């Protein structure tokens, strides 16, 4: 673990982060994207993050190569939701279960201290005991489940919603 650094996302991270995400798109129900993201779409995603404010992104890197990330993004479009954020954390295959997600979330939540953020939300496609354990360990609590809210790989999936006071 000591050879893994946590830092802010940089423009040079675009390709590795795209590869990590598209692996989840193609091979898991964890994200409800059906088609792989394009480079242009992922660039737009990366461009939303800043060093300050509500929307930030941190990368876990080994030998300077990104192996995961955690970010905060807009929760909903309507203005009254502005102080709520949605969080996400992804680790490349082979790097899950090593505490990297906790380190990424810790860096993200530390950076968000003092920002105008009231609540953080995370949606977890079920089943996913590892993600539930991570979110609970990071102070999230379950607040409900959307039943059969998404269809992927020919079946319907439930999504549990978790909330964290900021």
Image (tube, rainbow, N blue to C red):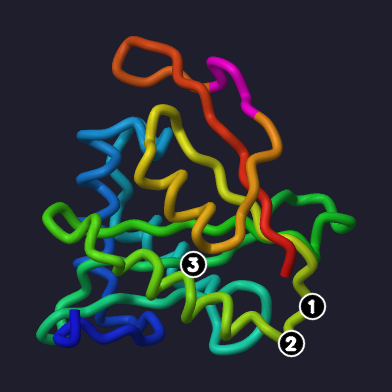
Which residue matches tag 3? 71
Q: Nearer the viewer, residue 49 or 125?
A: 125
Q: Residue furthest right?
A: 80
Which mark is first along the chain, 1 or 3?
Answer: 3
Q: Nearer the viewer, mark 3 or mark 2?
A: 2
Quarter occupied by residue 128: top left
Quarter occupied by residue 161: top right
Q: Secondary structure at mark 2?
A: loop
Which residue matches tag 2? 114
Whether residues under marks 2 and 1 lie with C-beta atoms below 8 angstroms apart, the answer is: no
Residue 125 shows which numbered tag? Answer: none
Q: Which residues are magenta?
A: 145-149
Q: Judge left or right: residue 86 versus residue 78.
A: left
Q: CA distance from mark 3 to mark 1?
A: 16 Å
Name the quarter where the C terminus is drawn: bottom right
Q: Judge left or right: residue 65 versus residue 130.
A: left
Q: Residue at x 10, y 85 (%)?
A: 63
| Image coordinates for residue 2, horizontal then vertical, percent | 18, 86
Measured along the vertical axis of the image, is residue 158 above or below residue 162?
above
Whether residues under marks 3 and 1 lie with C-beta atoms below 8 angstroms apart, the answer is: no
Which mark is first along the chain, 2 or 3?
Answer: 3
Which residue matches tag 1? 116
Q: CA distance from mark 2 to mark 1?
A: 7 Å
| Image coordinates for residue 95, horizontal then vertical, percent | 17, 61
Name the quarter where the N terminus is drawn: bottom left
């Amino acid at each position: 673990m000591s050879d893994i650094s946590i830092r802010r996302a940089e423009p040079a991270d675009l390709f590795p982060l795209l590869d990590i995400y598209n692996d989840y798109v193609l091979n898991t129900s964890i994200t409800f994207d059906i088609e792989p993201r394009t480079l242009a779409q992922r660039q737009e995603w990366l461009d939303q993050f800043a060093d300050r404010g509500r929307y930030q992104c941190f990368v876990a890197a080994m030998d300077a190569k990104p192996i995961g990330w955690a970010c905060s993004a807009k929760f909903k479009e309507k203005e009254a939701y502005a102080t709520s954020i949605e969080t996400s954390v992804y680790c490349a295959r082979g790097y899950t279960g090593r505490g990297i997600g906790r380190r990424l979330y810790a860096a993200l939540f530390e950076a968000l201290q003092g920002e105008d953020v009231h609540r953080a939300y995370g949606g977890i496609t079920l089943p996913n005991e590892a993600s539930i354990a991570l979110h609970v360990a990071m102070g999230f609590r379950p607040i409900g489940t959307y039943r059969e809210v998404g269809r992927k790989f020919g079946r319907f999936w439930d999504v549990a919603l978790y909330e964290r006071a900021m």
